[in-house]
Structure formats: structure tokens, C-alpha cells
Amino acid sequence: MTAPTSTSPTGTPYGDGGASAATDGRAAPGHTGSRGSRVLGALALGSVALLVMYGLVWSPPDAEMADSVRLMYIHVPAASFLYTGCFITTVASAMWLRRRTPGWDALAGASAEISLLFAAVTLGTGSLWGRPTWGTYWTWDARLTSTALLTALLVGYLALRRLDVDPTARSTRAAVLGLLLVPNVIIVNRSVEWWRSLHQRSTLVKLDPTIEGQMLVALMVGFLAVGLVFTWLLVHRFRVAWLEYQSERLELDVALAERRAEAGQAGEAQGRTPA
Amino acid sequence: MMAMTHAGYIAAGWAGAAALVGAYAAWVLRRGRTLSRQVPPEERRWS
């Protein structure tokens, strides 16, 4: 590792929110945005606006669930991208254990954090949907309980990543826990088939979905919007995790340089001391 | 326009989800700005 050559990691700012210039002459924005992420963000906002129109205005109420079905347009995509996030964390954890490169560790942590966010949205909207359809906010049903356990696992994973221990050991322990996420997702997903459940079975896994018309379009727009929001969040959170890694590395370099300088001064002082 | 049934649950679900995701997005952007000031530009590969 090389010591920082320009300014202190805790001292003079490296970026000023977009006005500074990099050493190679290019603009160096003091944030995690790029041209690609800005395009992605605009697409995400546009699709969310479309989802609001389809989900709350254009789609008709359901024959049985009436307007409460409008919660499905957030609940189902959020649950799907919770699974996607867990899958990314497990794959990135396996890659970290194999390659030991910081990018995989950063991706695993970023994806787990966004998965926890989507787990909260899934449980929250599901609970609000359950009250008018099942008559209760919560029941110890197989799907609900397994989703709560998956959420607890994500909380544990993120808590493990915040332990104040050696960064490599911390990442390794978290990666081992991260490997358990996909098996848990399989349990959550199959719970409605394996056990008697109040929760409805999957409606979209077959080629012949049991919903149709404007409701199906609204749900597809929901997948598009939530997917774009998920991707935008993942890009930015990954960059933040990368900055956290670099910042930690620079602080360590500075601390090592200071210790070496202190040791050198002590050695010189000893050499000057008369016998 | 017909009145929506279960309007309170729908409003709480949509608004709660938007608030949660919006607050998290704002936190991520703010943290990115703070950390960017501590890391040299050459380490920010996307810039």
C-alpha cells in the first residue's frame, strides 16, 4: 500500500460537491453520481410516476379485495427485489471468500442493506394489505414468519459488518453468514407450497398468470419502477461502500506513517544520547 | 370519481414506502458527499 500523496484524509477536503478538478484535469465530483447513474435516476423517477398513475388511478379495483389490491403493486415487486438483493449478497459473499477483493465485499454489504430496506417495505405493505383482506395485521403464517426470519438474518448480517475488529476477519465472518441468505430466500418463496398458509400462492411464476388486464400492466410497471429504484440505490450504495473502504485504508496509512515517524524520531534521540 | 375503499391502508402503504426509500436515498447521497471529501479523486472510479 502507498501512503497518500496529496492531502490528509481527515484534513483538507478532496471534493467540494462538483467544482473541484482532479489531478488528470477531469472534473472530480464530490459525490457518488455519474452520467449513467443520473440517467438511471431519471428513468427510475419517470417509472415511479407511471406506477403512481397505473397503481392508484388507471387500474381497476379487484372483484374480491376491492381497492386494497393497489398495495400489491408495491408489495410484490418489493418482495421480488428483496430476493434479488439477497441473491446478489450471497454471490458477492462467495466471490469475496474466493478472491478476497474489496469490491465484492462492498457489493455484498451494499446489497444486504438495500435488501433490508425492501424487507421493511414488504413487511409493512403486506401488513397493511393483510388488515382489510385477512382481518389482521400479522399472523404467524409460514410466509410471514419465514420473511421475518430472513429480515432478522439481514439485521444480524449488517450488525456483524459493523463490529470493530480486523476488517478482513469481519468481512469473512459476514460473508459466511451472507451465504445463508439464498437458502432462506428459497424457504420463504416455497413456504406457501410446503406448509398450509393464509398467504396466497405465487401468481406470476407460471406462463399463465391468474391476474390480467390493467392490473397485470400495473404490476409489470411496479416491477419496472421498483427494479430501477433498486438498481439506482445499489449503484450509489456500492460507491459509498467503496469510499468507506478507501477512507478506512487512507486513515490506516496515515496512522502507520505517523507511527514510523515517531519510531524514527525515538531512534534518532537514542543515537544522540551520550553513553 | 368513485371513492376508494380502504383508502387509509393504501395511503399508509404507498406513503410509508415512499418515505422509507426516499429517506434512505437521501442518507446514501449525503454519506457519499461526506466521504468523497475524504478520498482523493483518483480513487473515485466513476468520476
Image (cartoon, coloured by chain):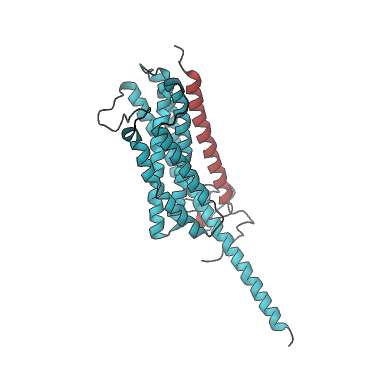
Chain colours: A cyan, B red
| Relative image position of residue A250 (x, y in whole percent) | 56, 60
Answer with left or right where residue A25 lies relative to residue A217: right
The answer, for residue A194, to whether it is visible in the render is yes
The C terminus of chain A, quarter of image: bottom right
Q: Outermost residue, right direction?
A: A274
**In the image, what residue occupies the spot 68% across and 75% down?**
A265
Residue at image position (53%, 53%) is A244
Q: Residue furthest left?
A: A207
A185 in relation to A140, above or below? below
Image coordinates for residue A241, horizontal then vertical, percent? 50, 50
Eyeballing the image, is B38 above or below A260? Answer: above
Residue in the image at 56% along x and 65% along y: A3
Query: Which quarter of the picture shows residue A203?
Result: top left
Residue A262: name its quadrant.
Answer: bottom right
Q: Is residue A24 visible?
A: no
Is A229 displayed left or right of B27 in the figure?
left
